Amino acid sequence: MENRLLRRPDMGKGWFGKDGLLLTTPEPTHKLITRPLIIGEDPNRHLIYREPRMARNSTTIINKTDGVNDCQLEIYLGSIHFSHHPLFSREHVLSQSLSKQCEVYHKIDRGRLIDQYREQLKALQYSIQDLKQSQTDPMQASEQLERYRLEVRAKRQQLKQTGATEYQLMQNVLKTWRELKQLREDQGYSCTTSQLVIHRFGSDAMIEQALRDRDIEAELMERREDHEATMAVEILQYQQELAEWKAYNKERKRTVRELSRKDSVASHASSAVESSTNVADIEAMATGNSTSFIPPKKPRPTAPPSFDEARARLELLEYYRLNHRKPGDPKLVPQLTQNHPITQNVPRDEQTRRNLIEGTRYKIKVLYNNKEFHNTKDKYLASDFSVAFDELLTVKIIEVPHCIELQIINTSFRIPSLITRIYVPIPDNTMILSTSIKESYQFSSNQAVTFDHSTAVGSGHTHPLLPEHGELITSGHMTLTACWAEREDGQPLCPPAIKKKSSQLEKIARVGVTGVSNVHKLKKWIEEANLDPNDPRNWELLELIESIPSTQEETKYFRLDKIDDDARFVDEEEYQNNRRFTLLKLRDQGHPALKGQCIPMNEEGISDSLWKSVNDYKPYSLAELPVSIFGNFYDNRREQRLRYLNDVREKVLKRAGSHLTNELTLEDVIHEEVIPNITTLGKTLLGFFAPRRPLKPVRTLRRKPKPQNVHVESCHIRVRVVRAVNVSVREEELRYNETLVQSFVEVRFGKESSKTASAHGPYPHWNEELTLPFCPPDDDFSPLALQKISHELEIHLYDEITVNISMDEVQRHQRLEKKWLGSLTIPFSTLHDRARIEGTFQLDTPLVLLGYTAPPTNSTLSNESSNTYVQLFISLEPALSMLPPISDKFDSVEDSLLLEKGKAWLKNLRDKFPSRNYTATVLDCNGKNVFVTRFIRPQNPPASLLPQDYQTLTGGSLLQCMERLAWFVSLIPFLPDALVFSGTCDVWFTSDIFLHMLGGDEEEHAVLLCNYFLFLGQRAWLVLGTAIPEGPTAYVLTLHPVSNRSYILWNPSNGKHFPYNLSHIPLHSIGCLINSDNVWGNIQEWDHPSRVTFDLQNSKKWSPLFPSTMNPLDSIQVDTLEYSETDPEQVQQLRTRIDRLVHDHIEQLREHDLTRWNRLCCRVLHRLSSRLEEKPFSSNETSQLHKRELKESLPGYKITGYPLHIKYSDTAQLLRAVESTGLHLCHHRRIEFAMYVTVHSYPNDILSVWIYLATVTPPDTN
């Protein structure tokens, strides 16, 4: 490419702009421009172009103009020696400990530290004597004398400590050697060559005793001097305290005498008291006869004790006896040899460990200025746990060195693992290969490694059989050399910067300190270290102090990234006052008011309303919600409730932190076929012999895609409508012994709709596939945007009626009308989570269906229930990605052991039954993981829903009370967590928050209903399972209050209940049962309720989370729920408002037709609506009663209609429900309408709304 550009006539300049950037066209796949074009605006008014220039004092690249052509660095990699390795056996750990102890002992012994300290003490004592005899300034002599005395005491403490350390080391060596020999005997083999030899050297008891006595006497003298120095100060303080005490005691006696004199009654008593010298008697008389204040007694101060020489001598003798070798005992010197033979025939575990050692490989990655330039070959670990590399690396450098890094990598496994990093200091100009020596660099790694076999101790933990060695960490040292190459004239090939800096460090290099960048700090440290000038090892450092010149006081600061000053385009004050920068910073921090907001490109484009909304935003709490929910008050409450939930969501997601970012795996990035193995090949071969059944194909399950590998441009919702059962039939046809109904299914999602053809009879078959296009807002198919979609998939069942408009001999005019028979709604979040929904669904049919009746029962399904069912298969094409759950990423207040047990319990069950719904812990509103049993406890329902004798209810009356409570719970509006928390987690709210918010999903409804039943004294369990169409859901299981032998399942979302042994019920899978004591996981072969055995004591059927002996966990629910009364006047105002809105909405939908209202029918509907709340579930008796009263009030009229029941959340939901029935689509010229709205109130502003709709056709007079 470079050659092609240079061969062009313009030398390739036409490809680049003035700013040096490549001229490119806008991205063709980008659909929206980032900033619209403003007409009349100068496009260059905000652009300032600066020519690029090279910094003069750049220290990154080596400047060759300084006379340096080539800079060459040489690194010699020697070997690695592990002082601990995960493959160490217990014998290796003891052998390594023995080696370290012997090494430390020999440092003390060979360095003759004890003799050096004695010589230094002698020299200091001589200096003290000379100073006392010298004729110097007394003030200066006293200061020097005090400094010498402090040094003498420090050296004596070092002498004592060194002797104690030598003695203790020898004891530890002997103890470790005994443990090593015992271990070899116990295991029957040896895997190390360590052999300890003890050398005994005789000693002169008299000389050693004399030395010890001299040390004791010297220390006693020092202690006596210290005591005398402090004694003078203490005596002065004592004399002062004694004088104060005497004065106080004298004053106290005077006060007592005066008080006794005033209180004396008789003169002889007075004279006796005055002449008395017994102070105690005077005090007794004063305290007995006066109430005045008498000063309290003070103890007499104690004189400072004198120096106890005998006690101090005993302490020193006891110390030397316990911590030093006894005078005259032979001196023991250990010698560690490597002559012990290694056993070859060892057990299997030990042989496995040795095989792992032979297969362990390491390599070293070398980085220069954080750039990799060399990888060594893999080297095997030797039996002595050393790795020899022996490589010399020659590096030609063009950049000034800043960092040399070595990475030790274990390549024994398929995925190499980094053990540790070693940072090598930059060598100075005196370090060349010919004169440099090998240096040893220590390293360690906190990597935790464990093995299944018992002979390897691992690392990163404390071995149970070696507790005294503490945590075993992988460690060792590496020998290497880093130096500069050498020219022919002996000069190093190093950069000029290294030469200038190294000219001051020649003496430092001679001392052996490398990598020093500030010689003045080194000089300051040497001066503050107070080095001993008599120690011959310190003469080089002391000479170094004199060679370093003194400088002015250095600056106390340093700069990071000095280039930032040149790249800062605005000052800090302008940055803080800029609105756009402030909004961008707040949006990056996750401010709730700016979520998804687009910030204008210029500050002038930021509106005052946006700025005010951000500044005025504050989190909402439940206490700020208004008391009333009606009309505008309720709309305000609903908005604030959603904002409160959004604040909870932000708090929960903030606790998750960085865990929300999805970690990519290999399968997410690379799509390839799995390599066949024996299992897959076996299944493939068996497939050839499987029977061929073309008429009964097996559906292949689709894998849910990951968020990283999905790119969707279009999506469709496919609904296959198979058949329906128990469709209501028209009453007018029964006169001719026919059961005619022409039903069809219409599917709606948003503004899109599609319908099937009409089918005849109450048991129609369609087997048609309907396709609806799905387009999310802004064409955003990301998982986070999909979880925010609140639309529902509506499935309606209609009866198609052919109406004759006119008929003559030549032609007939007809019109098709539809009558609503029932519906089913499925939230998009449910369809998104499950990707496909399949089954037989029960339609929500009205309590009374005027003009229709139930069909004759000739179906197996209809024998179980009179409800209408429809069989559907719903799917998304293609499948859309989902966010992974993050509940395991949150903190918890539970005990860590219980949490680990819960995770193991869940993993075991989900591995066996991955499709079942199991739960152990859930998130509360604070973003903390808690056990689900804490949500279950008896809680009181509203008093208005309970009879007076609710504690003694049994049989049918108890069942009616439970039905009433279930109906009350079902009236609380439904708010799925997928809309609030974007599908990332499922948060459970406590019952008091749930009742205050008036919104929650299946779990909150089920927990509240279960707690109500427990309050009635019933045995109740929370059921987590899978239902149609909800997906993962929660039900309540109770004993039947009449029989007490069978069980009842309660659906808290609609208040209905049904026996558990029915074959067609919404709940088709049970995962676990929960109460306040435990969680039982279903481990039976079947999970359908009709085939499940509810014997929780059978461990083969149910797996408990906690043992039966464990006490129940404390509940997080409140003891007593508080309820507020609903204002009846506001209920009446709301009823009038809903009536007016529905009335106007129907007339608006029929804007092209005349809408007549039958007032007589409205009054009849008023009378009938008042009794709907008493029996909210469908029954033949209620339906016949309504039809009979309407027929008596309006004889001859053809009436069709139904009462719609809606749990009130907002008026828009009511209008959508009325419009979906299609009642307004009747275009008969004589049609009349009737409607009545009833609102029933419950505590806590919970409302039940009934809208009775009907069409009335007058009789034909012709």
Image (cartoon, rainbow, N blue to C red):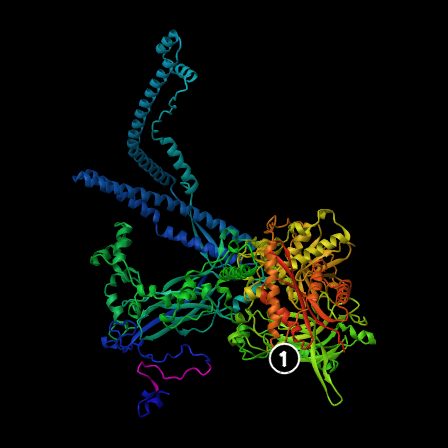
On the rendered image, what quadrant is the C terminus found in?
A: bottom right
Residue 877 against residue 286 in the figure, above or below? below
Q: Quadrant of residue 712?
A: bottom right
Q: Which residues are magenta?
A: 15-29
Q: Residue at x 26, y 60 (%)?
A: 519
Q: Position of residue 924 (x, y in %)?
A: 56, 57
Q: Is residue 22 magenta?
A: yes
On the rendered image, what quadrant is the N terminus found in?
A: bottom left
Q: Residue 720 versus residue 72: which sits nearer the camera?
A: 720
Q: Is residue 248 left or right of residue 555?
A: right
Residue 699 seen in this snapshot: no
Q: Position of residue 596 (x, y in %)?
A: 47, 69
- Judging by the rendered image, the residue that carries numbered circle 1 is 771
Determine whether the residue tagged by mark 1 lies in a helix, strand or loop: strand
Q: Is residue 1210 left or right of residue 177?
A: right
Classify mark 1: residues with Cα within 10 Å, few (<14), some (14-19) or many (20+): many
Residue 561 against residue 711 in the figure, above or below? above
Q: Residue 208 versus residue 593: which sits nearer the camera?
A: 593
